[in-house]
Amino acid sequence: MFTPYRLLTWMLLTAGEIRGRKKLQKMVFIAQSLGYSFTEPFDLHVWGPYSETLAVKLKEMTDWGFAREEVLPGPAGNHHYIYTPGHNAAQAVRGPEAEAVLPTELVLHLNAQDATLLEGVATVLYLRSKGQDGEAAGETLARLKPDKFSDPARVRAAGIFAEELEAYRIS
Amino acid sequence: MKEYVFRDPVHGNISVTDPTVFALIQSPEFQRLRRIRQLGTSFISYPGAEHTRFAHSLGVYHLMDRVLRHLADRGIVSLDAEEHAIACCAALLHDIGHGPFSHLFEKLGKTHHERWVERIISSPESGIYEILAGRNPRWPSRITSIIAGTWDGPAFVKELVSSQVDVDRMDYLLRDSRMCGVTYGQFDLDRLIQTITVVDGHIVLSDKGVHSAEEFLLARYFMYWNVYFHKATRSIETILDKLLSRAVHLYQSGRRDGLGYLPPVLEPILAGRAISLPEYLSLDETDVLYAIKCWTRAADPVLADLADRFINRRLFSGIRLDERLDAFVARHDQVLAAVQAAGFPEPEYYREVDKTSNVTYSYYVKPTEGGSPPIQILMDYGKPPLREVTSVSDVLKSIATERVTRHVLFVPKEAAEAVEKVLAG
């Protein structure tokens, strides 16, 4: 019944806490790129791949009690969002069909990274999915995000991390 | 070349003078869009909602041409003739990848329509590719990059194809509104275009455009709740979803006989195998509707009943859950049992929770971490010169503060009362 929310709830239960909407979006996109069955469509926005469908789904999950959202004031008048499993999270993943196929190790590995690195990695993966090779994707990343990726070392780090993630690819 | 004029109910005359654009329109891939409705199943709620992605795509092409001319005529920014043509082709082709009843078939085919856009434009198997590459071998990849958002030319071009104030939304609001016979989606298009400008390569609105932006975003808000999330439309879409799931189940569990007639073009979808480009392009809504009509006489009683509900508009009843989500989570096994007891032995085909994330359209919400870039207004006084639209509009602040979601449980009318009792505890 709650299948559409199962994988994301599982990700939250595994991570325990995900800090930032951007980070959560990039974690889902990266997992989807590696073949895991997140189905939300993503477009390329200023902050990298972004899914409006996923943003709405996350709001629905807080309504259902599958996720809990905590909003903290940020330094520049903005807000920081922290996601943890909600009071009904166990219901979303219960039953025999709940063996969500998303490796714990991958979730923890992604969650341990800085959101900006994940933004770079997700953008590189998005560009590769559009037919750009590794080098071209790195150049495009530096051009699209000069404020964060003008340093070639950061672009390389994003490319290397994306390569490492290939070990988790399932399709 | 000779000028071709399309008489359009929204924009009046749409003129085509570029031979490449005309060849694209004439291609079988683009003509296929005549057989794909813009609003999927909304004709169930609004009898006029029979307009197609063909007409919408022409409208988007027309608006792109119009906005680019406005920017050039005002001396704001001018593209060379080649870039202008490429931008117009991207606008024309932005929806070329849509399949029948887009959202549902994306789910079945497991491929998002934007992937099909890329394949249709970039694959040598496609006539569209042949036309574009014949004009210039670089055009297919450049047009794909505008639609995918990876274009390395001026950013405002890709923003006009896809952003919070793009020509796609301008056209679909006006068109959907007119064809549905409602006024919710109407806004002052001339004024909105007049206030579009470019700052640092990005689309912004001048401060004279605040009220146009308000009208435009309120139009989206009203259309979202009144048309795109209309209860009857969501009900019939749930039925369509269920009947296609049933057809897939019968096919994949070796019960092909339960289906009766099956159009060959639907076979790869039901089999769940990878679909080739020619197979995808041969599929449109006529195939699906014919199959559903035939399935009203299917041997399988569940498929036959669901198909009959679709064809004869026997809708599921919608039960709002928003105040009762916890109750539903706790009692959903009992809900299923109540549906079964009402005469539906396979109840999973007769209950579904529909939610706002199932709707492809959205309205404006306040910019958040990682979200869509906001609409910026260029102020002619004070600092900073660029301000996010909700900071200068109290009207928009009130609708954009929080994302509103809605959950509706759909079950057959025959089961609705029993389900209500279960939810009431």
Image (cartoon, coloured by chain):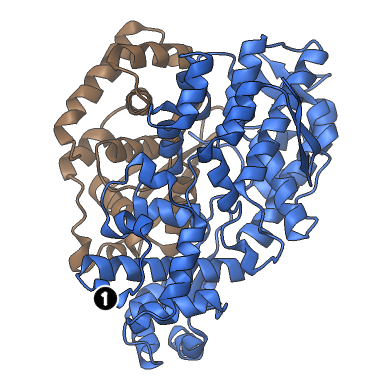
Chain colours: A brown, B blue
SS of the residue under disc 1: helix
Tell me residue A58's x, y (percent): 44, 51
Circle 1 marks a residue in which chain? B
Tell me: residue B312, above or below residue B8: below
Left or right of residue B194: residue B281: left
- The mark tally for this picture is 1
Q: Nearer the viewer, residue B29 or A110?
A: B29
Query: Is residue A85 something that shows in the picture?
Result: no
Q: Position of residue B336 (x, y in %)?
A: 35, 82
Q: Residue at x 49, y 90 (%)?
A: B414
Mark 1 Cα-neighbour bin, 10 Å: few <14, some 14–19, many ≥20 = few
Q: Residue at x 49, y 30 (%)?
A: B128
On screen, residue B329 above or below A141? below
Q: Nearer the viewer, residue B345 or B19?
A: B19
Q: Quadrant of residue A62?
A: bottom left
Q: Is residue B77 left or right of residue B417?
A: right
The quarter of the displayed image where residue A104 is located: top left
**Residue B250 in view (yes/no):** yes
Closer to the camera in the image, B267 or A111: B267
- Residue at (39%, 66%) from the top-left corner? B244
Q: From this viewpoint, which residue is outermost toward the front?
A: B2
Identify residue for label 1. B257
Residue type highlighted by circle 1: Asp
